[in-house]
Amino acid sequence: MFNNAGIVDDHKPRIIDNEKCDFELVLSVNVTGVFLGIKHAARVMIPAGSGSIITTASISSHLGGAASHAYSCSKHAVVGLTRNAAVELGQFGIRVNCLSPYALSTPLATKFLGLDEEGLENRMNSLENLKGVTLKAEDVSNAALYLASDEAKYVSGHNLFIDGAFSIVNPSLQLYQYPNDSRILSYMSPRFYPFLFRTFLLETFWIRK
């Protein structure tokens, strides 16, 4: 069973501007809806002695400041509920996992950011850690298919990130930035490989001597 329904509220960065009713609406769908989905899936799966329950979380389940207060709170709750349910239902052979994708072009995301599909993808590509690849809905569905399959028969209680390592890096540190220098970049060219190989042989020869 795949819990994939969710909503987002209008983004109001300041918590003092957020309304209680808007906050509760997001939690009612994103958390209570997931709770009910897991509950009723379990009612069927427990007698069967097996099953797989998957829920869509978000990188906001791990990072602060990536979405609205209500949405971020709801996705943190999804991870907690996933882990609790995995512990409880494991005795019946039921696996419970969740997915945390990077931002991708969906009606929910375009509404939240106020961008069209192309604009959203361009924006996300400029911020992503894994360059040269654009996350698509099919990538998330493939991850869900993996968790639902026997290939993941011993995976439970896991929050699978589909984010190209975005959630584990602080880009402000800039520890691994390559200089924008043609001389440096030329060393990475295949034309430079013979020189590197000769250098390796010379160093090896002198070390052994």
Image (cartoon, rainbow, N blue to C red):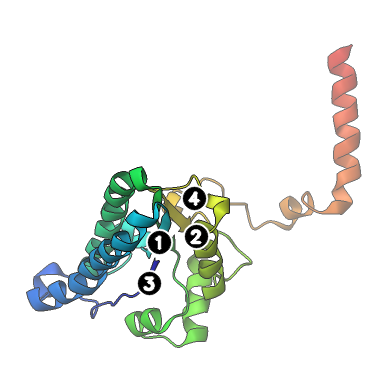
- Measure the alpha-carbon separation of dots 3 and 2: 14 Å
Task: Using a 10 Å C-alpha cutoff, classify the residue at mark 4 as few (fewer than 14 neighbours), some (14 to 19) or many (20 or more).
Answer: few
Amino acid found under the numbered disc labelled 3: Asn
Say which residue label 1 marks. Answer: 54
Query: Residue at image x 28%, y 59%?
Result: 78
- Percent position of residue 177, x then y: 57, 51
Residue at (53, 51) in percent of width and height: 152
For the residues marked 4 and 2, what is the alpha-carbon distance in whole angstroms? 37 Å
Q: Which residue is mark 2?
A: 148
Q: Earlier in the sequence, mark 4 or mark 2?
A: 2
Question: Is residue 189 rendered to the left or right of residue 130?
Answer: right
| Residue position marked by numbered label 4 in the rendering | 174
The disc, 2 or 1, on the residue closer to the chain's N-terminal end is 1
The amino acid at mark 1 is Ile
Estimate the x, y position of residue 185 in percent, counting from the top left: 73, 54
* In the foreground, 39 or 81: 39
Q: Are marks 2 and 1 in contact (CB under 8 Å)?
A: yes
Q: Amino acid at mark 2?
A: Ala
* Residue occupied by mark 3: 4
